[in-house]
Amino acid sequence: MNYTKFEKARIIGARALQVSMGAPVIIDVPATMFDPVDIAILEFNNDLIPITIKR
């Protein structure tokens, strides 16, 4: 699905907050990656974020 830049920012931000608060990570993350935003971007690029958008 195509997202606007605002939707993408909202999805990544919400997922990064979830990861920083202790939510389980859905994808295998390299051992050197600690930043929740980078993890959320990695999940977003692989279409694994369990967040839906209602338009």
Image (cartoon, grey):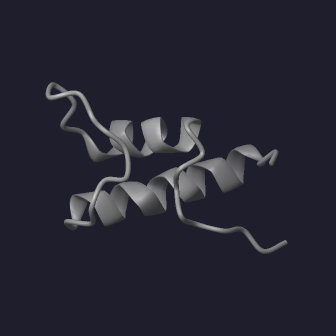
Q: Position of residue 38 (x, y in %)?
A: 36, 36
Which residue: 64% across, 48% down?
A: 8
As drawn, the residue found furthest toward the left would be 31
Above or below residue 21? Residue 32 is: above
Which residue: 46% across, 63% down?
A: 14
Left-right relation of 32 to 20? left
Which residue: 56% across, 35% down?
A: 45
As drawn, the residue found furthest toward the bottom would be 54
Left-right relation of 2 to 19? right
Left-right relation of 39 to 41? left
Of the pair 38 and 30, the residue shown nearer to us: 30
Q: Position of residue 28 (x, y in %)?
A: 30, 38
Which corner quadrant of the image does residue 42 belong to?
top left
Q: Position of residue 43 (x, y in %)?
A: 47, 43
Above or below residue 51? Residue 11 is: above
Which corner quadrant of the image does residue 44 belong to?
top right
Which corner quadrant of the image does residue 52 belong to?
bottom right
The total number of labels drawn is 0
- Quarter holding the C terminus? bottom right
Which residue: 82% across, 45% down?
A: 2
